[in-house]
Image: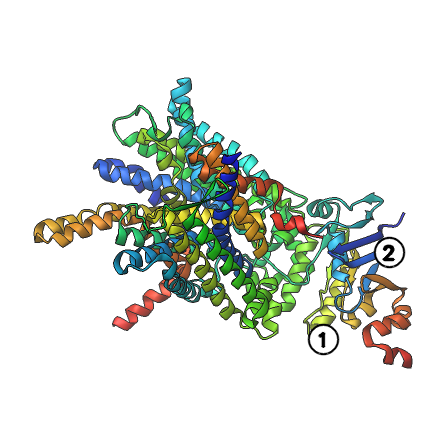
Amino acid sequence: MKRSFGTLLLLAVLLVFPWVLKDAYYQHLMILVLMWVAIGSGWNLISGYTGQVLFGAASFFGIGAYTAALLLHKLEISAWWGLPLGGVAAVLLAFPFGWICFRLRGPYFALATLALNEILRNIATVWESLTEGMVGLLVMQTFVSKIPYYYIALGLAVLSIVLVDVVMKSRWGYYFVSIREDQDAAESLGIDTRYFKMVSLCLSALLIGLAGGLYTNYMGFIDPKVVFSLHDISIMAILVGIVGGVGTVYGPAIGAFIMVAVQEVFRTGGFGLLPALGKTTGWPFMTTLSKYVSEAHVLSFGILVIAVILYLPNGIVGDWSSIRRALIFWRRKAA
Amino acid sequence: MAYFEVKGITKFFGGLAAVNDVNFQVEQGEIYGLIGPNGSGKTTIFNCINAYFPLTKGEIYFEGKKISGLKTHQICKRGVGRTFQVVKPLKRMTVLDNVIASAFLHTRIKSEAVDLAEKTIEFCELTQYKDKLAKSLPIASRKRLEIARALATKPKLLLLDETAAGLNPSELDEAIALIKKMRDSGITIIIVEHIMKVIMTISNRILAINHGMVIAEGSPTEVAGNHEVITAYLGEDYSAQS
Amino acid sequence: MEVFLQTLVAGILKGGLYALIGLGMTLIMGVMGIINLAHGQLMMVAMYVTFVLFHYLGIDPYTSLLISMPSLFLLGVLIQKYLLNPLMKVESILPENQVLMTVGIGMVLTEIARFIFTSNYLSVKTSYSSAAIFVGGISFSVALTIAFIFACTLTGILFWFLIKTDLGRSIRAVSQDGEAAQLMGINAERIKVVTMGIGSALVAAAGTLLLPIYYLFPDIGGPFTRRAFVITILGGLGSTVGAIFGGLTLGLAEAFSSTYMGMEFEDMIGLVIFVLVLLFLPGGLKSLTKV
């Protein structure tokens, strides 16, 4: 009972958020967070719960994004139809890919997803007659205000979390975890591991592809470097998953919040703190430092990956008990 | 036609025949033991039946239908269950969840799976551990959990792989009781075991293997007194004495 | 015909260097069972070391092999000891955390390089960088040929080391069966540290040898990591001989696709080979030789 009260409260807060905080900048950040909740949940399904780690999540994101954009450009179909169709397209990609690559175990599957990411990025860049290559595709934005986009993103995020929760409590969920823990034992217990790995991958692709379709509609512009980006989409998806907590329902939500915050801190130099300090103190060192910091977000991602894997391998949700213990320890020491 | 039949199965790894032209039949309702020194090919035979890897030669029949060539999960669906020597439960889940996962084989409805899981847990006398995490279980209970997981798939034939290894004498008696209970409930059992006490007391018939080949078959007393079997286990000197 | 022979020569020479890259990675894969996705980035570090030695101390790249190889050996050792070995004791749901760790390491190395050297393209122009000798109407790039000779020598030394020395045999033992090796008294953790060092040193050599005829910028690590695992998978995981053939194959494939299809396909051809191997020959070239 306590848990559902907290969740309802959170949901209520999220629903009124854009009316309370009218600043477009914060609305934008929250939209990003919600989008990453969806991507993170999708990543978590195949990587965290089923144990087949996705290193190239951008493959599905980019396909979703390009489907929405291309449907508009080539067939004059509104990009809003492209949103769900982007999800479908991602699933259509996941199907043959999984069929071919699930014979690979562990790290080789992860590598294959990386290769897929690279191949798709190359195709999108080189096939100019279809995608305009590096020039990218522009989509007319339907709404001027961010609020409608916010609610669509919120809907997608809620859908993702509910989907993961429902699936993991069902037969599929039990099978996914069985596959993760010991694929051979799972087979001996009658589980068609190849089929269920496919199911898991398709569900993940669906969520990630939907997020891609949303991205096209919201940002209004996509190009191969952005939507098939290794660092900003694929690695970010992994970080959202591992920071929050691999194999937990709410992990990706927490991970999304933290990672978007981290990204913003670096992009703006501490939310404008560093440049402001530079101006007030007049130290040129501060301005160069803020310039470096804004370009250092990839470095921060790399360091985060290393740190999280070493010290917080089950994420904030997964390792919560150890975090609490550490906090109590420090508080006692300070007292 | 026998209930379960293995015909001329052979498995080569590179140039070495781990299993070489093994034939045997198992009758419904019996407990059929498989013994042999380390490395003789017992677990490999299970791996062949279970389709963990493909047979080089030979065929396997269950209930009159060929199962060799099917995939592992299909063999399980046909009613052939199996436990593993090195038990690997779903560590971070409860005992109940572990068994529920297997119980989903014959039903899609969760409540039915939970029901079957609870009944299976009761059968294996693990009810006290029902809501405990699998990784917190002591070894004897983990072995029972392994059996429970296999039982929840409602097998007609169960392959038990070294279920008794690592148990102390009282745990051993409990394990023997559980195996007999399973046989009495209608499950045919093929058991690979090292511990003589277990295999001798419960098997109806025993197959002795060495170097991947059959060296003896018969009742426990017949096999125990067999010259070649004694040589294989204890060496030439002992067999000369008997 | 001449173009064909020219491409063939270029492919083989480059392939020799690629074999060095693949050897390092396949050793690491065989012994540690992990895919080192920071392999290309280690090569990048070696290239920057060589660059600095050349520009600020005037040391010729071939001489700086004596510095770049040990430095990268040390870097590899440190990475294995403090970042990768500890992971074996961490109990985590996340599978592939070792591979992920190497991704993180690769990113950190790249960004630190960018921080120090900026994203500018750098190069090392020696007296022989553009020199070529003509044999039978075909031009052999001097730098590439010398690099090839060094690569062959180093490969030879590596094989001697693996077959004749105790340490080398221990490495092969751990590569074949880690547990059995430990039971025979081999300290597997120490072997892993040494192997990472050797793998890094080998790829450092490749980087140093390649620099006179290539260009350098921080993001160069990625493509080379990709080449490394294409070579390794093509040759067969853990197979040192396979890595040599894999390297030569990739070198030839890149040379031919570059000549006959265009330079922009050089990167793609590696990916195409990767996909083909996955689909049709998952065990790599090595599986073709199985009796």
The chain containing the residue under callout 2 comes to B
Note whether A117 is above or below C144 in the view shown: above
Q: Is residue C202 left or right of residue C237?
A: left
Note whether C196 is above or below A183 in the view shown: below
- The answer to which of marks 1 and 2 sits earlier in the sequence is 2
The residue singled out by tag 2 in the image is: B24
Tag 1–tag 2 contact (CB < 8 Å): no
| Near-viewer residue (C15 or C137) | C137
Local crowd at mark 2 within 10 Å, few (<14), some, or many (≥20)? some
Determine whether the residue tagged by mark 1 lies in a helix, strand or loop.
helix
| Near-viewer residue (B166 or C279) | C279
**Residue A77: where, in percent of width, then height?**
41, 19
Separation of marks 1 and 2 at Cα, in angstroms: 31 Å
Foreground: disc 1 or disc 2:
2
**Residue C204: where, in percent of width, then height?**
41, 58
**Residue A288: where, in percent of width, then height?**
17, 50
Q: Residue B169: which numbered mark, if any?
A: 1
